[in-house]
Amino acid sequence: MINLRIDGLDVQAEDGWTILETCQFYGIDIPTLCYDHGLSPYGACRLCLVEIGEGKNAKLVSSCTYPALEGLKVKSHSNRIIKARKIVIELMIARCPNSKTLQDLASKYNVQKIRFKIKHEDCLLCGLCVRMCKEQMMSGAIDFIGRGKDRRITTAFDEKSDLCRTCGGCMYICPICELRCQGPDPPGAVCGSCLEMSPTCLDFSSEAQCFMVESGCGTCVRNPIKKNVNEMEE
Amino acid sequence: MKDIDKFKQKLSRIRKSKAEESNRPCIIVSSGTCGEARGSKEVFLALKNVIKKYKLGKKVDIRLTGCHGFCQVEPIIIIHPENIFYQSVQPEDAEEIISETIINKNIIDHLLFKDPNNGKKIKLEKDIPFYKKQNKLLLKNNASIDPFKIEDYIGIGGYSAILKVLSKMKPEKVIDTIKESGIRGRGGAGFPTGIKWSIAGKTEGKKKYIVCNADEGDPGAYMDRSILEGNPHSVLEGMMIGANAIGAREGFIYIRYEYPLAVTTIDAAIKQAKKYRLLGKNILGTGFDFDIKIVRGAGAFVCGEETALMASIEGKKGEPRQRPPFPAERGIWNKPTNINNVETWANVPLIINNGAKWYSKIGTKGSKGTKIFSLVGKINNTGLVEVPMGISLKEMIYDIGGGIPENKNFKAIQTGGPSGGCIPKELLDLPIDYDELASVGSIMGSGGMVVMDEDTCMVDVAKYFLSFLEEESCGKCLTCREGIERMLEIVERITEKEGKKEDIETLKELGEVVKDASMCQLGQTAPNPVLSTLKYFENEYLAHIREKKCPAKVCRALISFKILKDVCNGCGACRIACPEKAISGEKKKLHSIDRKKCIKCGICFETCKFDAIDKRAGSD
Ligand SMILES: Cc1cc2nc3c(=O)[nH]c(=O)nc-3n(C[C@H](O)[C@H](O)[C@H](O)COP(=O)(O)O)c2cc1C
Ligand code: FES
């Protein structure tokens, strides 16, 4: 058993757990995108950021890949995290504006404006399909090629792969395939229409259960940030 | 007699015969990749022929060595024992060098180095200002060694450190010595080497690896190359000591594909070391097994990052992964692995030979020893510079570098490679030291230094480094891949007259997040060029955005050309040169530029002999 502290709470993790797994066990909501329970963690989307360490040494890490270590101090919703998460979502939507998953994330995290040129890509390069194909379907028909801005996912030599059994696992797991509801907004805008309709934490726990009601975690629409968690701990 | 004692005797025999040789005159031709590119091989052959012609073969030695650092004036030759320094030597000069300098002991004036600041000719290597403030612990040996001859390395005391370790130092003692010396990794992050070794040493495991990181992907940096090309055995010896200390039996040298000469020298060095039984099974009868393999990298910048490098050695895609687990716990094929940079390894034998105390006296409190920098850009003397840590940027630029050419004003120095920061004039007294550089928003990195003068546009500089990083990010982390691309998008827009008021805020906010949220140091340092130029040169950004002006007159969309009424004599040269036919005018009459057609290529400006064309900041 590993003892660590998350949001000021003493918790225990099994050997080999990541911070994300520990948080999920304790019901602490951390958004993820490139993570899936049945696949190896990859750490590409940077949505699941948490803050570890204290003072000058505090840093952000992706909780889906960072192991739960003895004595670690973790914050799941500091101002620093929320700021970074919002930018991450903004960057995602600027790349793939028509995904329902991303639009929902935007409304949940109150991202209201995209400051970058909209790209209309249909792939976010989260790599879920690559891992699905390799790890669950035991096929490995697709993989990443290229680096930097030329990175993309494809079959070997861009040709129809002999390994592919057209099982559709890649499509099943793709977070970008499902289109957002086509409201009256111009394409590329953040629709934001769900903003008032789905109060955030209540997906996971009722208000009475939320131990952050007092301080405000920064994501709750009913209780916008009053104090941040940093101050609360002191 | 034990093998190790036999080896000791062999070393002293070689050293004795080398000492005798050293009394003879010797012509040293520096021929790293830099020298070769300027024809050092041809000079070497020409000199050899002339030596043959005069039948001096037995009296004069000639040696082809690695780079000496002053790459700007290659091909360099140095004549021992006086250490006469000849620069920019051509094959035609060979005859004169032998007949005048070697036979008649006369100096050849036109081959001497001329100090650009006072025009004085300098005869001896040690009097050249470029070398004066340097402390060449590593680079000095490049001149004394033919990299293809292990005997040369032994001649200058090589392989005595490994002998010392194998005969009388326990691994813990070696690690303690490295710890006490205070040396920090030269690969960029500056992690204390002794601590790294002790973690790798303590990790349980039958199989462990050590790696020499010779990927050197920073554009313009080539200190690692010069060590591998000039003194490969020092790296091997360092690795042997490291392997012995942490208990590794196998080592890799991961060397970038673009370094063919370095691969040849290191390959030859490994073969020779094997012949001397310094590598292989049961080394010198001590029971220590160690072997080194060369792995050639595919030339991706990110493969220099240690976890990506290990993946690449395993034959996987070179992508960084999450640390922990650190390589010392789980490295290549999940075995404990210790990675150090070429320059770090080359320092190890020095520390063992001279002791931790000696080493820790050089440098500052937090940064010990010497560091090699590649000094390039708008500066009089360019090349490789080895200085003790703690020397100030001012000394680097004005004493060693000889100041800025054409009496232009210094503007900034960029340290640390593509993801380093730009340091302005006000901070020139800053000592060069890991922590001091970090405190002003830059990094030591692997030791790149680019000097910029008043004609450099800082927004353009940020654009240049971002476009390098955009290509070289592995693309895995969204924040790094998309973040760099978006920063570049904004900076490009600013240089193209499309800058918006809120751009500076967006850049700062995005830069901070990319730094915070990316996994490896590539992403974590990628915003440095933007953030540091914003910090020290925000006014330049503002001039681009608000006044639509590029004060350094670099960004094409933000400058304009005008023909000066009183100066133009209507010669028509610009009219003929203009590729867009944007200039019109009758012969001997004032010409004019059609703004609509002008693409601001600047050819007219270069062409005009009468300085009648004015380049202006601002596009009106
Ligand atoms: C993007 C990136 C590129 C790097 N390139 C190099 C390199 O070319 N050579 C090198 O020695 N270290 C490089 N490093 C640093 C290595 O990850 C590692 O820290 C270093 O090899 C450790 O050796 P040291 O402790 O001797 O410095 C790079 C790091 C990053 C993040
Ligand atoms: S969910 Fe952890 S980085 Fe994507």
Image (cartoon, rainbow, N blue to C red):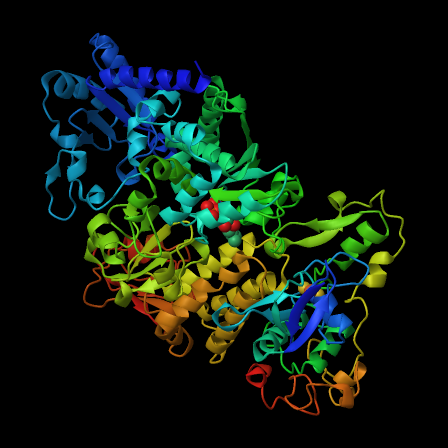
- Considering only vertical position in the picture, is B55 above or below B316? above
Q: Tell me residue B136's x, y (percent).
A: 28, 40
Which quadrant of the rendered structure holds the C terminus of chain B? bottom left
Number of marks drawn:
0
Q: Tell me residue A57's x, y (percent).
A: 50, 67
Q: Tell me residue A133's x, y (percent).
A: 82, 52
- Horizontal side, residue B200 vs residue B542: left or right: right
Closer to the camera, B152 or B363? B363
- Considering only vertical position in the picture, is A91 above or below B265? below
Q: Residue furthest top?
A: B55
Is residue A217 shown to the viewer in this render? yes
Is residue B555 shown to the viewer in this render? no
Q: Tell me residue B271's x, y (percent).
A: 49, 21
Say which residue appears at 43% left-offset and 34% top-offset: B169
The quadrant in which residue A191 appears is: bottom right
The quadrant in which residue B15 appears is: top left
Closer to the camera, B225 or B34? B225
The quadrant in which residue A180 appears is: bottom right
Say which residue appears at 38% left-offset and 57% top-offset: B434
- Considering only vertical position in the picture, is B372 above or below B3? below
- Horizontal side, residue B564 vs residue B270: left or right: left
Closer to the camera, B330 or B436? B330
- Horizontal side, residue B442 vs residue B121: left or right: right
Which quadrant of the rendered structure holds the N terminus of chain B? top left
Say which residue appears at 59% left-offset and 45% top-offset: B203
